[in-house]
Image (spheres, rainbow, N blue to C red):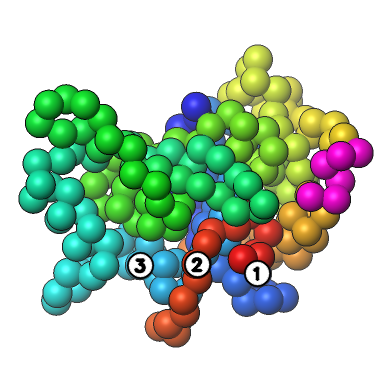
Amino acid sequence: MLELEIDSIRVNRIVQSRVVLLKDKNSDRYLPIYVGTSEASAIANQLQDYIPQRPMTHDLLYNVILAMGGVLHRIIVWKIENDIYHAKLVVGHNNNNNIEIDARPSDAINIAIRAKVPIYASDEVMNVCSIIIDEETGMPVVGKGDNSEPSAKKNVSPRPVGNNELVSLSAFEDFVESLDLKDIGKSKLDNEETVDDSDTSAGTS
């Protein structure tokens, strides 16, 4: 597993989708996750230390964990299936047995921010879905870094993509090419409410 941190929240200007960019703490790899507008707003508000008058949904979920004697240890984006990410909350209880709770990455990230716990991704997810941003062009490259020296930028290179992966990655490549990666800061998010059933690698649900 690799520990990630929130780099930024960005907007795909072609389809106006929100993208959370998670960065590997020990390399130049990024994991992009499309999320709904309301989930992105909740993440942005929490990062900006906004305190709502009443508990929001993710505040409620975290409060329930605490009220029932649980301790959130970490969240993990552990699988991608049919272009949809799967995450889980790892919660410890009084008997010290960990409970793993299935969740969308956007919800898991929102709760992790509130609990101030680490965000992880599996090697499988990073190998398939991570991108590397070329410092010279500012454009991303689909692939993975050289794990032998993850902190050395000169050793980061895209991995070969097999023929069997081309079809499943085609939408992801289109997404990568359409991202506005020059906007490094967090995007201004409106208050539009949306319902999104899944978090994806390519903006599809």
Residue visible at 26% across and 44% down?
116
Residue visible at 10% across and 31% down?
94
- Please state which of residues 23 and 159 is positioned toward the viewer in this rendering: 159
The image shows residue 119 at horizontal and vertical percentages of 40, 40
Q: Is residue 111 left or right of residue 37?
A: left
Residue 165 included in the magenta stretch of the image: yes
Closer mark to the observer between disc 2 and disc 1: 2
Q: CA distance from mark 3 to mark 1?
A: 18 Å
Q: CA distance from mark 2 to mark 1?
A: 19 Å
| Secondary-structure class at tag 1 | strand
Instruction: Give the amino acid type for the residue marked by disc 2 in the picture.
Output: Asp
Closer mark to the observer between disc 3 and disc 2: 2
Q: Are marks 3 and 1 in contact (CB under 8 Å)?
A: no
Residue visible at 14% across and 76% down?
53
Q: Which residues are magenta?
A: 163-168
Q: Which residue is mark 3?
A: 42
Dot 3 or dot 1, earlier in sequence: 1
The image shows residue 40 at horizontal and vertical percentages of 44, 67
| Secondary-structure class at tag 3 | helix
| Secondary-structure class at tag 2 | loop
**Which of the 4 quarters of the picture holds residue 170?**
bottom right
Q: Which residue is mark 1?
A: 12
Q: Is residue 9 left or right of residue 97?
A: right
The image shows residue 202 at horizontal and vertical percentages of 68, 59
Instruction: Give the amino acid type for the residue marked by disc 3 in the picture.
Output: Ala
Q: Which residue is mark 2?
A: 197
Dot 3 or dot 2, earlier in sequence: 3
Q: Is residue 87 visible?
A: yes
Q: Residues within 10 Å of mark 3 (few under 14, many from 20)?
A: many
- Please state which of residues 2 and 146 is positioned toward the viewer in this rendering: 2
